[in-house]
Amino acid sequence: MMLLVSVYAASNIYYTGKIIDKANFRRLTEQLLCKWSDEEKLWDHPTEGQNIKSLLKMFEEDAHQIFAGKSVLVIGGSTSRSLAADFMHAVLPPELRNNVSLAWHKYTVEGYQLFPASGKKEMDFGRMYSKPVMLPLMEAGWNFTHLFEHTSGCRDCLINYTNIDYVAELDGGHTRSANGITYEFSWKPDIFAPEADPDGFNHRYCPPNRRYDMVYIGRGLHDATFQREELNNRHFLDERFMKLGRLLECFPETTLVVVRTPYFTANEREGKHVLNIKESIFDLARNGVFGINRTLIIDGHLLTTSVGSPVSYDGHHFDSRVAKSVWRLIFFASAQFFAGANGIDGSNVFKNNVGVHWQECGITTW
C-alpha cells in the first residue's frame, strides 16, 4: 500500500509528498477547538500563520489521492443520501473538480441537491436526480448504475422506498483502475430493519466478491422522528444498534466503519431522542460494538449545534456546508487508517492529548 499521510520521522511529518515541520504540525493540532469558518462556512480549525493551511483543508485538497482505488458504501436515510455529490466532487482531480465547481456555480446549485426529495417516488432513475448537479459529475467521469433488486431500499422500514439505490464509478471503479473510485448507496434509514438489513448484508454487501474500504452508517433520525416513545427505553435503543453491529462483523478488519450521529433537529421532542441516539452510539462504540480499532464516530450533532453552524432549511436537513464538513473530517481521519496498518488507533494523530483535541472537532476513534 502506498504511504500517503502522517509518517512520523525524527524531525518532520511527511504528508502526500509534502513535508510539514514537526513544530508546525504540533501547532496545527494544538489550535483546536474546531469551529465554523466565517470565510468558507466549513467546519475547520483556524491557523495563526497565513502560509499554513489547517490539516483538515490539506487532507480535503488531497482527497483524490486518499481515495484512489477505494470503494465506499453508504447506508442510511436522506441525510446520508445527500452526501453523494459532495464526495464525488471532492475526490476528482483538481482540474476536473474545478470544472464541476464552475458548472454548479453557473446553475446556482449545490451537491446536496443531487437527489431532491421529489424524486424518491420515481421509478425512472433518470428522473430522480437533478440534472444541473448530476451532468457535470458525469462529464467529469462518474458513471451511475441504478440498483433495483431485492436488496434495494428497505421494504420493512417506515419510509419503505425500494428504488433509490445505486452504484457510481469513477475511472471504471476501484476494481478496474488503480485510481478508480466506487461509491455505493443503499437506502436503509432505520437503526435496524429486521428483514431488509440482514438481507442486504448477507446477499449484497458481504459476499466474498465484494470489497469496501469504508462503510458509512448514517442512521437514527427516522427513529427519532417516527418512533418517539420507543427511544425512551435505552435498552431497546441499544439492542437495535447491537443487532446492526453484529451485521457489521462480516466486514474484514481492513474496512473502516464510520458511524455518524444524527444532525440537530428543530423539533424539541425529537431532539431529545437524537441525544439518546448519540449517547447510545458513543457508549456502544466504546465497547467495540461496531468493531475494535476500525471505528470512526463523526459527531453530526456537534457539527450542527456549534456556534455559527448552518441552519436547517426544513428542520431536519442541511445544505452542502454540512455535507462538505462531514467529508472533511472523514478525509482527515480515514487517511490515517488507510496509510497505516489499517488500524485507526495506531495513528499517533489520535493518541494522547492530540486525540482529546480531535474529539472537540467531532472525530472519535475506537
Image: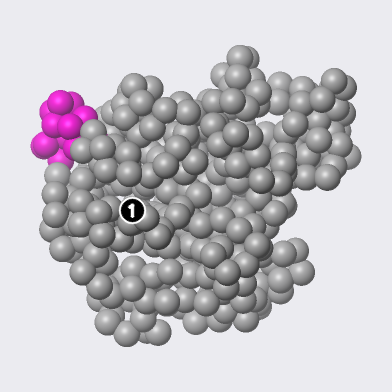
Up the image or down, 261 lies above or below 193; here it is above
Query: What residue do we see at 42% from left, 28% from top?
Result: 292
Image coords of residue 219 (percent x, y): 31, 46
Which SS type dominates the magenta stretch?
Answer: helix
For image coordinates 70% across by 26% down, the residue present is 29
The residue pinned by badge 1 equals 206
Label 1 neighbour load within 10 Å: few <14, some 14-19, many 20+ = some
Residue 356 to residue 106: above or below: above
Q: Nearer the viewer, residue 277 or 174?
A: 174
- Front-most of residues 159 and 343: 343
Residue 227 location (% of width, % of height): 14, 44
Name the amino acid, label 1.
Cys
Asked if the stretch drawn in magenta spans residue 213, the answer is: no
For residue 230, what is the image quadrant?
Answer: top left
Name which quarter of the figure residue 176 lies in: bottom right
Tell me where residue 238 appears, x and y as whole percent: 21, 30
146 lies left or right of 53: left
Q: At 66% from the left edge and 63% from the top edge, which residue is drawn?
A: 179
Residue 179 in view in this figure: yes
> Does dot 1 land on a helix, a strand or a loop?
loop
Left or right, 67 with reference to 62: left
